[in-house]
Image: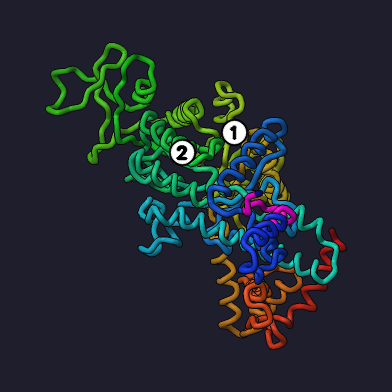
Amino acid sequence: MKNLAQSNYSSALETVRSLKAKYGNSWNAINSESAARMVTQNRFKTGLDIAKYTADIMRKDMTEYDADSSNYTQSLGCWHGFVAQQKMIAVKKHHKTTNKSYLYLSGWMVAALRSEFGPLPDQSMHEKTAVPSLIAEIYDFLRQADAIELNDLFKRKENGEDVQDQIDNFETHIVPIIADIDAGFGNEEATYLLTKKMIEAGACAIQIENQVSDAKQCGHQDGKVTVPHEDFIAKLNAIRYAFLELGVDNGIIVARTDSEGAGLTQKLPVSQEKGDLASQYLAFVEAEEIAIQDAKEDDVLLKREGKLVRPVRLANGLYKFKEGSNIDRVVLDCITSLQNGADLLWIETPTPNVQQIAHMVNRVKEVVPNAKLVYNNSPSFNWTLNFRNQAYDEMLAEGENMSEYDRNNLMDAEYDGSELCHLADEKIKTFQIDGARKAGIFHHLITLPTYHTTALHMNDLTEGYFGEEGMLAYVKGVQRQEIRKGVSCVKHQRMAGSDLGDDHKSFFAGDKALKAGGENNTSNQFKEMSEKVKTKVAKVA
């Protein structure tokens, strides 16, 4: 007998009918079609099912990118399951497929928005459990999106519409999630344990950075302290063991290096022989030549090229790297990570400059030709100013007269319609295409977009609602837009599962079911308009 977890409707129907025959009259109240419908609407039974399914997607996408760089992938950071759900519903609506669209779980947003301590900076101070909990929440909402859309299709089928092909070829809202584990939240055992929880919640890709766990800083802030390669490799191993233990054999590890902006290390590794990893790491540490008689009591000394040197040590015990060594350290970090189990790289950069990114990635590719990057299109960058500066430099190099522009004030709105603005905006528009083609960027993400959109939308609504516009601010700026653009949650009762629940009640209780969707349900006011929107969208498609 086939497993009931089979998601195909016909197979599920056959299985339920067989079970009814096996268990006899006591199952008479169970409708085979209704049960098969519920099975079909819940394709993924566990987080591990999701992790295995989405890992396959990422591996396929990585192979396709290797063959053609135009096959890059994208995601937006989501801090709540509802945000992720609405994102994927919108992706399907506007682009007709979820192909090459992922989700990103940002440790920054978990710290800022999901901690029981309240808002926190991005320094790994939030609860470890908050991360897998958010992963599970996101996939709960995406599974609900599947159930709601399929439920609508089944209702249309009951009403005589020929939608069986849409049911049989339904594209799920479930997509890969790249999940941020920060610096691993402790030693390698702690990393392993937390990784397991994240995988069990549904994560197929774990992103880990090479900072010291208990001194972790946001990648776009100062004060970052990196660890020796051996320490980071141990955590890469811990993640791989967790994937293998749980049967996600092709899980993805994203190794992030913060070395570009990090000037400190907490530890001096032990070198076993000249030229080994520890030796290469130590070579980056700033040190001053010293005679043994000039050494202070309890000084830490190194022998370097036959000479005695003293590493520069700060009052807090941290050691400094040599000025200007950051790019070489990034390249070594990346190569070492890929040679020790990582699948993708993440390089934090000070500005979004394709040429600068390519300079580092191409050096890595000299050793690992298929090296690929996950890149943070970060809101920490001032994109407008950065690209207007790039456009200014390009126009200046081409001999154009730049006297009409104030180089120190390029953000000014007076330049919004200028040649410089158009050139800069075109560069921003093509940044992802250019980065994928020239700089090995397989995956483009924005870490914190929904943090900023929430703040922006609340700012705009609040200004009008508490001002002269009053209720018109909501109606004009929100609800009218939802209706005309066909945003799913305009019928918020349906989106929260009310219609789905009504159908389930009918399955369970038949005519005795107490339903919410009767004549007095005010959501019916949106029915006529939503049907017109669907018709309009279908015509456009």
Task: Identify the residue shown where x is 59% and y is 69%.
Answer: 457
Q: Which numbered dot is residue 428?
A: none
Residue that numbered label 1 is attached to: 372
Residue 165: x percent and y percent? 81, 56
Give the image quarter of residue 13: bottom right
Q: Pick whichever, 481 or 520, lies toward us.
A: 520
| Disc 2 residue crowd, few under 14, some 14–19, many 20+, Cα 10 Å | few
Tag in front: 2 or 1: 2
By secondary structure, the bulk of the magenta-drawn segment is best described as loop
Query: Can residue 220 be seen in this snapshot?
Result: yes
- Relative to 149, does residue 406 appear above or below in the rendering? above
Q: Which numbered dot is residue 245?
A: 2
Q: Pick whichever, 376 or 352, lies toward us.
A: 376
Query: Can residue 91 be seen in this snapshot?
Result: no
Q: Pick whichever, 396 or 248, lies toward us.
A: 248
Residue 55: x percent and y percent? 59, 41
Give the residues drawn in magenta, as a range: 2-12
Asked if the residues shown at circle 2 and circle 1 are in contact, with their CB atoms under 8 angstroms apart, the answer is no
Q: Is residue 199 magenta?
A: no
Give the image quarter of residue 523: bottom right
Q: Is residue 8 magenta?
A: yes
